[in-house]
Amino acid sequence: TTKSLIIPAAGSGSRMQREVPKPYLKLAGDSILEHTVRRFLSVDGLAQVVIATSQEYLDQANDMLEKVLPDTVAARCVAGGNERQDSIRNALAVLSDVDLVMIHDAVRPFVEAKHIAECCRVASEAGAAVLGVPAKDTIKRVDGRRYVEETPTRKFLWQAQTPQVFRTKVILEAFEKAEEDSFSGTDDASLVEYLGRKVRMVEGSRSNFKITYPLDLKLARLLIEKE
Ligand code: C5P
């Protein structure tokens, strides 16, 4: 099966309190984005990598791809949008003719090869697969004034990570439908759910955390030195 990898890297990083956007912060000398791309180089059938990034970083992202990708993998960098979903839409617009689309956050550099492979296997079978872990904390749903409205049973709650992998037709249809209905979600699988198609959860690992807050960056720097 041929595969494209889409990496949204156009976030502003407001929660990190830094000038440089998160994907371009350094980990052991290289950008977080570069570490993340490298995790996918061993994926079987990888045909294309598309990075969505802010205009100022297009050149840097292009140079990095040229450096790390083999000649057999096509590279594209596109401008991101205001929301993550807009960034993905721009990336899907330049998609090659592949069987599976893997979408993975630029800021999850610790994803493991075996979990990427498992998501691809499940997506080929079920159409859509999401990597995740069972919720560790009890999760409360609150109203606008922070009064608790509901405590869903924890054993049915999972934290969704990436990669999220889809059959190409499924993800293209999901984005089309979401655009038609102005539906928005904070991950890609939610658009497929909105389309009414099944999405399977694949159990991953807690080390595949998203570098979001300053504490995450500290942890990432400690972990990368141990590798
Ligand atoms: O904002 P969030 O933490 O969900 O971001 C996840 C990923 O999506 C990050 O890699 C970020 O750079 C990317 N993103 C994007 N375009 C946006 C917002 C976020 O590509 N407008």
Image (spheres, rainbow, N blue to C red):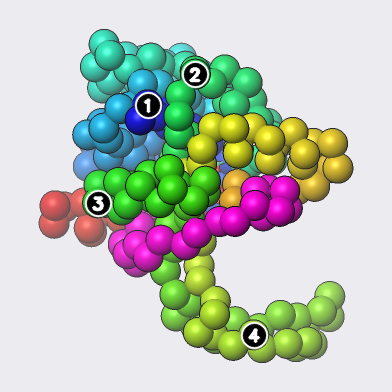
Asked if residue 106 is among those painted magenta in the image, a careful observer would answer no
Q: Is residue 163 above or below residue 132?
A: above
Could you say which is closer to the camera, residue 128 or residue 4? 128
Viewer-side label of 4, 2: 2
Q: Is residue 157 above or below residue 124?
A: below
Give the total of numbered labels. 4
Q: Is residue 115 toward the left or the right of residue 58 in the image? A: left
- Of the residues shown, which amino acid type is indicated by label 2? Asp
Which one is earlier in the sequence, the residue at label 4 or at label 1? Answer: 1
Could you say which is closer to the camera, residue 201 or residue 147? 201
**Circle 4 crowding by C-alpha within 10 Å: few under 14, some 14–19, many from 20:** few
* Quadrant of the displayed image that contains ligand 1: top right
Q: CA distance from mark 4 to mark 1?
A: 39 Å
Viewer-side label of 3, 1: 1
Which mark, by number, is residue 114? 3
Which one is earlier in the sequence, the residue at label 3 or at label 4? Answer: 3
- Of the residues shown, which amino acid type is indicated by label 3? Lys
Residue at 51 percent across and 71 percent down: it is 158
Q: Is residue 225 above or below residue 62?
A: below
Mark 4 = which residue? 152
Residue at 78 percent across and 87 percent down: it is 149
- The quadrant the N terminus occupies is top left
Residues shaded magenta: 191-219
Q: Position of residue 185 (x, y in %)?
A: 70, 52
Residue located farthest toward the top when viewing the structure as drawn: 71
Which one is earlier in the sequence, the residue at label 2 or at label 3? Answer: 2
Q: Is residue 179 toward the left or the right of residue 96 in the image? A: right
Which mark, by number, is residue 97? 2
SS for dot 3: helix
